[in-house]
Image (cartoon, rainbow, N blue to C red):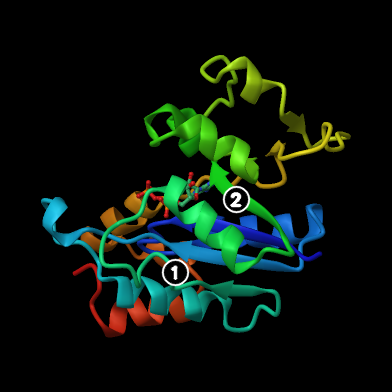
Amino acid sequence: MRRLAFYGGTFDPPHRGHFAIAEALLKEFDLDEFIFLPAFHAPHKTRTKPTSAYDRFAMLCLMTAAAENMSVSKLEIDLPEKPYTIETLPRLKALYPEDRIFFVMGADSWRDILTWREWEKVLLMTDHIVVTRPGVEINTDHVSESVRERIVNKKGGSAVGAGPNIFFSDAVNIDVSATDIRKRIKEDDPSWRTDVPPPVANYIEKYQIYT
Ligand code: ATP
């Protein structure tokens, strides 16, 4: 049984916070593979022009090219409609029936989890890893008792019972966000370059992704 992590997000652009999370969780959770899962952007549903899935996929591939145990999945961006996580997880389980799947999210996604379709079912369907993010407190008051009793504080913790758990990891504490990077690029503030891997920065400039 392999241990696979799937990390969903828009990755617009992928940044050093995302990469640090992959590196840290590969070690902390003894993972065989860490797979970035870029989300579908429904062009007709957004007001501002979204960055195409091609570009976000390419940037993720550049970021992970030299990392042996990291890869990028086309699963969500290949679909005709944006899937909900409740639809993606059964697909992943069907694709990897022999493996243990961990679904990764940041503390802000955990905070907003009640807005996810069938969130309780999502959380009890596979293992999850919630990663700390500066400025976002990790609370557990908002989730139900059945979810709360599946939570494991990774520091010194081991899995609870049989079945999926929700692991809290504080292995990464990096204050960087994609929104802030896009803002700095637009403002011509060169500091943005240090927050994305060099090949991604070159790609952003070469194809003028945000300008
Ligand atoms: P934005 O600033 O536009 O919201 P983002 O930096 O959060 O973007 P996403 O692609 O939306 O990037 O992030 C994907 C996932 O990674 C989300 O679950 C988010 O919570 C998490 N994440 C992103 N950056 C960090 C970070 N610095 N620390 C912890 N988690 C993060």
Q: How many marks?
A: 2
Q: Can the viewer see residue 210?
A: yes
Q: Which of the 4 quarters of the picture holds residue 150?
A: top right
Name which residue lies at 38% across and 36% down: 117
Name which residue lies at 28% across and 63% down: 185
Q: Secondary structure at mark 1?
A: loop
Q: Quadrant of the N terminus?
A: bottom right
Amino acid type, residue under disc 1 in the picture: Leu
Q: Quadrant of the C terminus?
A: bottom left
Viewer-closest of 53 and 18: 53
Viewer-closest of 93 and 37: 93
Q: Which mark is residue 75?
A: 1
Q: Does residue 133 sit above or below 139 in this rendering?
A: below
Q: Does residue 106 sit above or below 144 in this rendering?
A: below
Name which residue lies at 59% across and 26% down: 138
Q: Position of residue 108 (x, y in %)?
A: 47, 35
**Label 2 neighbour load within 10 Å: few <14, some 14-19, many 20+:** many
Q: On the rendered structure, is 80 left or right of 136?
A: left
Residues at marks 1 and 2 touching, judged by CB atoms closer than 8 Å:
no
Q: On the rendered structure, is 179 left or right of 103?
A: left
Q: Secondary structure at mark 2?
A: strand
Amino acid type, residue under disc 2 in the picture: Phe
Viewer-closest of 60 and 120: 120
